[in-house]
Image (cartoon, rainbow, N blue to C red):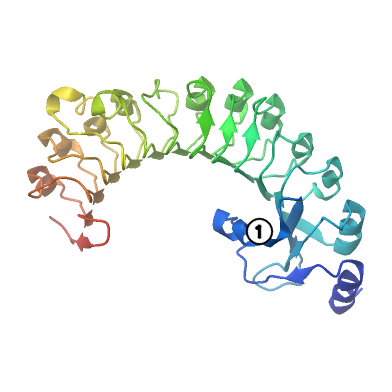
């Protein structure tokens, strides 16, 4: 069947389908999904097709499934392979008919972890947003052995399964703006393969030992309020960390006697440090140990003068002093 005949058949089977070719298929930003509000809260799917005859970007369709069954979806897709899937609302079990080749999925507004997601064995990226999990995430999440990016954002969770630590291929874990009934599960900090951990707006007061996170390169713990207004001392255990975001953590100040030398100043691999809106008026001299620092963000603080320690950062390339302006240096 020619491509023209396929498109004609699609329109006949499901007239609600329309092409949206400008959507980037390798990501599912929340703002884009919000564009589907006209479909209401009922279940719908957006998908991208992997077709060898396509040029730069796969043909992408959106479909309102309020009046479309999964059988019609399968007929509409035909022999094409669905690689990217975006759904809102609790999906039916019959969704597994399109599971074999889906690598990227965004799920929004669900009230429990759908068992059908366990059938998507090819998933590499899973983003769950604006959802509730009163019974937590099931153990079989670790069966998604190809998963490298796992995001659960703006959601309510009772717990995470201990089996999460068995996901040895996981590189990015994002729990931003998620709420846990108790402290963050310990299994998060036993993920030896994770290189990017995002815990902003997670109501953190402290961090447990990070010694098992030997691969961690990027850590975002912004918008949390840590005890004593100081960076967690356990940050010193992250010997490979390159990017640390502490923005809006209300750190008050950084006196040398309050843990900074045993924390941030000992992360000698650090290249990017974000301290925006931390309510500080000076930086300690111990930060001069950060010999590899290239990017430093200090905006929206109480500095009357540029902290003298900044002049010791010989590799500094970008110094951000407020929200909108950046001063760029070849070297200091």
Picture coordinates of residue 254 (x, y %)?
17, 32
Examine the rendering and report whether any part of residue 26 can be seen: no
Picture coordinates of residue 36 (x, y %)?
66, 60
Which of these two is toward me, 119 or 76? 76
Picture coordinates of residue 226 (x, y %)?
32, 28
The N terminus sits in image quarter: bottom right
Find residue 66 and report its image quarter: bottom right
Residue at coordinates 44% horizontally, 36% vertically from top-left? 199
Examine the rendering and report whether any part of residue 33 can be seen: yes
**Secondary structure under badge 1?**
helix
Q: Which residue is mark 1?
A: 37
Residue at coordinates 51% horizontally, 27% vertically from top-left? 188
Residue at coordinates 31% horizontally, 39% vertically from top-left? 246
Query: With 79 as the anchor, is 268 left or right in this view?
Result: left
The C terminus sits in image quarter: bottom left
Find residue 150 and report its image quarter: top right
Which of these two is toward me, 84 or 170? 84
Q: Is residue 51 above or below residue 258?
A: below
Query: With 303 as the anchor, is 81 left or right in this view?
Result: right
Picture coordinates of residue 110 (x, y %)?
69, 40
Count of picture labels: 1
Residue at coordinates 87% horizontally, 66% vertically from top-left? 14
Circle 1 crowding by C-alpha within 10 Å: few under 14, some 14–19, many from 20: few
């Amino acid at each position: 069947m020619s491509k023209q005949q396929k498109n004609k058949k699609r329109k006949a089977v499901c007239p609600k389908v329309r092409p949206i070719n400008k959507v980037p298929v390798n990501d599912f930003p929340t703002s884009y999904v919000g564009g589907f509000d006209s479909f209401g809260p009922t279940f719908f799917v957006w998908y991208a097709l992997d077709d060898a005859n396509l040029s730069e970007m796969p043909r992408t369709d959106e479909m309102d499934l309020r009046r479309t069954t999964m059988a019609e979806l399968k007929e509409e897709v035909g022999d094409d392979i669905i690689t990217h899937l975006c759904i809102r609302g609790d999906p039916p079990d019959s969704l597994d008919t399109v599971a074999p080749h889906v690598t990227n999925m965004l799920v929004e507004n669900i009230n429990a972890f759908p068992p059908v997601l366990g059938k998507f064995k090819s998933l590499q990226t899973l983003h769950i947003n604006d959802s509730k999990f009163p019974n937590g995430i099931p153990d079989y999440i670790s069966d998604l052995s190809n998963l490298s990016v796992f995001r659960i954002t703006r959601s309510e969770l009772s717990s995470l399964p201990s089996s999460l630590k068995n996901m040895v291929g996981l590189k990015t874990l994002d729990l931003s703006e998620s709420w846990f009934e108790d402290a963050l599960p310990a299994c998060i900090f036993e993920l030896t393969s994770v290189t990017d951990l995002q815990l902003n707006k997670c109501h953190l007061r402290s961090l447990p030992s990070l010694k098992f996170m030997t691969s961690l390169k990027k850590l975002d713990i912004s918008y949390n309020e840590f005890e004593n207004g100081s960076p967690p001392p356990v940050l010193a255990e992250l010997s490979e960390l390159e990017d640390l975001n502490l923005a809006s953590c209300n750190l008050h100040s950084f006196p040398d006697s309050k843990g900074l030398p045993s924390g941030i100043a000992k992360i000698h691999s650090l290249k990017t440090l974000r301290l925006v809106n931390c309510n500080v008026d000076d930086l300690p001299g111990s930060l001069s140990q950060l010999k590899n620092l290239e990017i430093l963000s200090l905006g929206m603080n109480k500095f009357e003068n540029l902290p003298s320690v900044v002049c010791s950062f010989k590799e500094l390339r970008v110094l951000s002093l407020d929200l909108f302006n950046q001063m760029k240096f070849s070297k200091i």
